[in-house]
Each structure stands twice: as C-alpha cells, then as structure tokens.
Image: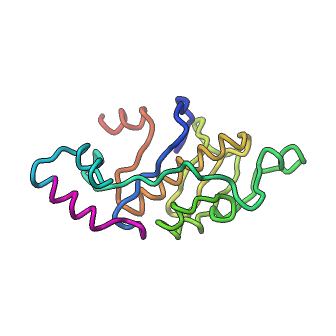
Amino acid sequence: FYKGEGVRSITTYFQFAGPNAKTAALDQLKKAKQLEKSGVNNEEIRQQTGWFKGFDDKWRFEISDKDADFANGYNPDEWKKNGVVFNGLTFKLGKILKHDNLFAAYPQLKDVVVEYTRRLSDGALGNFTPSENKIYIDSTMSADKIKDVLLHEIQHAIQVTEGFAMGGTEESAVEALR
C-alpha cells in the first residue's frame, strides 16, 4: 500500500517488470544470466542488457512511466470541480490510464478495477488487493497524487504476477524482522 511518505523529486518513474511480461527481451535475459555466471556485477549487467536482479534475487527490467497519463477524458480534478463525488466510483484501469508500454507488457492490467474509497486504514492512500484484482484509491486526492498512487499500486500488481518480493512501508519491514 501507499502511505505517501517522501516526495518524488524526479520526473520519470519506472515499473519493474519481469520475464512474464509479453514484451520481455528474453534474449537479453539469457545474456544477463551468462554475464552473471562470468562474474559481471549487477549494474554492469543492467547497463549491457537492461536486466538486473532485485534484492529478492529475481530478474527484472524497467518500463518507463514517463508517458503514463490519464485517458479518455478522465480528469479527476475537473470532475471534482463539477461536483462528481468519487467515493464509491469504480473504473477499469485500462479505461482511465494511458500507458501503452505497460499494457503491452501486461495486458491483463487493463482489467484491474480501481475503486475510490474513504475507507483505507492507517493513513494509506492506495492499496492493491490481489484476491479482488482491485486497486483502492483514497477519493480525496488531487489528480497528480492519484496518478502517483496508481503507478505505485500497479507495481504491486506486477510483483504478484512476477512473484517478486512485495514492497511495503518501513514499519512493515521492521515488523517482518521481529
């Protein structure tokens, strides 16, 4: 889930994708594995192939979020100004988000349901629930924050698809170590 700690100070973000992505360059993954066996470090492998290992020891590559934007006239800020109440609204992700590279890699993400709610706990701004194939989003946020949280929660959906270690908060990491 996303609690909104920290402020992103860069302008391009990335989704970490894996070998199950439809656009995965598996020939480059094979090369990455060969480079690893020959002793090349993870960063050099990434620079040569685009692939690298995460802390969970699984291979991944990056999909840029640079061109991600709202789609089909979806503008939460404008809608709210016009009196649309977001609490309880649901949309399919593919209807509200334009992200060609992401959806080419993971077409099933278009069908993830996005539901606006005020019922998120512990100050969370978003939450991906795999059993429901649903992203819950705090209905009170601005459009920029909604996009930021959506992209964060999409990463959790990819983590499930790829079997990557799930992210969390600093508090959840400390709790897991106890």
In the image, which residues are magenta? 21-35
User: Does the segment drawn in magenta span residue 177?
Assistant: no
Q: Residue furthest right?
A: 82
Q: Is residue 100 above or below residue 142?
A: below
Please provide percent x and percent y for residue 123: 60, 35
From the image, which quarter does the C terminus lie in? top left
Please provide percent x and percent y for residue 118: 70, 44
Q: Residue furthest front?
A: 48
Q: Is residue 64 above or below residue 171?
A: below
In terms of secondary structure, what is the magenta stretch mainly? Answer: helix
Is residue 67 toward the left or the right of residue 61 in the image?
Answer: right
Which residue appears at 11% of the width and 55% of the height? 37
Is residue 49 toward the left or the right of residue 94 in the image?
Answer: left
Q: Is residue 104 above or below residue 166?
A: below
User: Does the segment drawn in magenta span residue 27?
Assistant: yes
Please provide percent x and percent y for residue 39: 10, 48
The one of 16 and 173 positioned closer to us in this rendering: 16
Please provide percent x and percent y for residue 146: 66, 45
Is residue 13 toward the left or the right of residue 113 in the image?
Answer: left
The one of 51 and 87 positioned closer to us in this rendering: 51
Which residue appears at 53% of the width and 50% of the height? 65
